[in-house]
């Protein structure tokens, strides 16, 4: 399969597909942390170019920036808050990305933490599922949403004990945002085994 993982600099999901023999590429504005097939560019510009070339991907998985979208940011980005316009812009950008990805592939998934984006995507036909890391072998909590088009909801692979809020408690650091956004290995494995 030809697989595009958009807005992924970690390379974790990309490598799970590659381990299983798929032609997987990641794309992000930043270089990838795991060397491999990676386009360092804007995801929308990449998709526009691929569409012009009449390229087709068997699966597209998107991980758009959640800063302005996540419900945890309501105190800054909620209605009536000083940064609310940034949230509106992020919603518009993400819905546009979703629609572009559906032109590139019949099978699209978009991952974000609990977020304001999911009602918008549901209104335009996406199936929405919420999962937790502890359903995929990681003893912690982080409610994660998946908007799905042409792919089935994920089935838990390894339910474990432990409900630690590690992500929420993560101490400030230079890489905190990056580390909080990283895809859990067990979830990436589920992507690569259940959606291929």
Image (cartoon, helix red, strand yellow):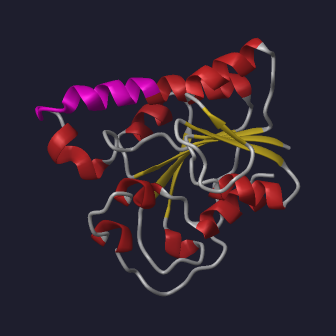
Q: In which quarter of the image is residue 77?
A: top left
The residue under the point 64% across, 28% down is: 101
Farthest residue toward the right? Answer: 21
The percent coordinates of residue 161 (x first, y second) are 49, 87
Tell whether position 76 is magenta.
Answer: no
In this picture, residue 36 sits left or right of residue 169: right
The residue under the point 29% across, 32% down is: 87
The residue under the point 72% across, 37% down is: 107
The percent coordinates of residue 178 (x first, y second) are 43, 54
The residue under the point 19% across, 38% down is: 78
The percent coordinates of residue 109 (x first, y second) are 62, 43
Magenta: main secondary structure equals helix
* On screen, residue 166 above or below 40: below
Magenta segment: 80-93
Q: In which quarter of the image is residue 108?
A: top right
- Between 54 and 8, the residue placed more toward the observer is 8
Regarding residue 148, the answer to whether it shows in the image is no
* On screen, residue 59 above or below 187: above
- Between 124 and 165, the residue placed more toward the observer is 165
Regarding residue 55, the answer to whether it shows in the image is yes
In this picture, residue 146 sits left or right of residue 164: right
Tell whether position 86 is magenta.
Answer: yes
Identify the image quadrant of the N terminus: top right
The percent coordinates of residue 193 (x first, y second) are 77, 61
């Amino acid at each position: 399969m030809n697989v595009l993982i958009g807005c992924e600099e970690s390379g974790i999901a990309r490598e799970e597909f590659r381990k299983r023999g798929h032609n997987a590429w990641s794309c992000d504005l930043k270089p990838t942390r795991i060397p491999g097939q990676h386009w360092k560019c804007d995801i929308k510009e990449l998709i526009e170019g691929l569409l012009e070339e009449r390229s087709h991907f068997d699966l597209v998985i998107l991980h758009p920036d959640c800063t302005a979208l996540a419900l945890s940011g309501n105190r800054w980005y909620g209605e009536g808050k000083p940064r609310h316009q940034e949230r509106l812009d992020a919603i518009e950008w993400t819905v546009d990305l979703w629609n572009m990805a559906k032109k590139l592939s019949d099978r699209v998934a978009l991952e974000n933490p609990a977020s304001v984006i999911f009602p918008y995507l549901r209104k335009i036909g996406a199936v929405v599922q919420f999962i937790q890391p502890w359903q995929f072998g990681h003893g912690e909590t982080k409610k994660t949403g998946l908007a799905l088009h042409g792919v089935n909801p994920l089935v838990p692979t390894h339910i474990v004990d432990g409900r630690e809020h590690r992500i929420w408690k993560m101490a400030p650091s230079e890489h905190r945002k990056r580390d909080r956004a990283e895809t859990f290995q067990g979830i990436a494995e589920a992507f690569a085994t259940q959606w291929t």
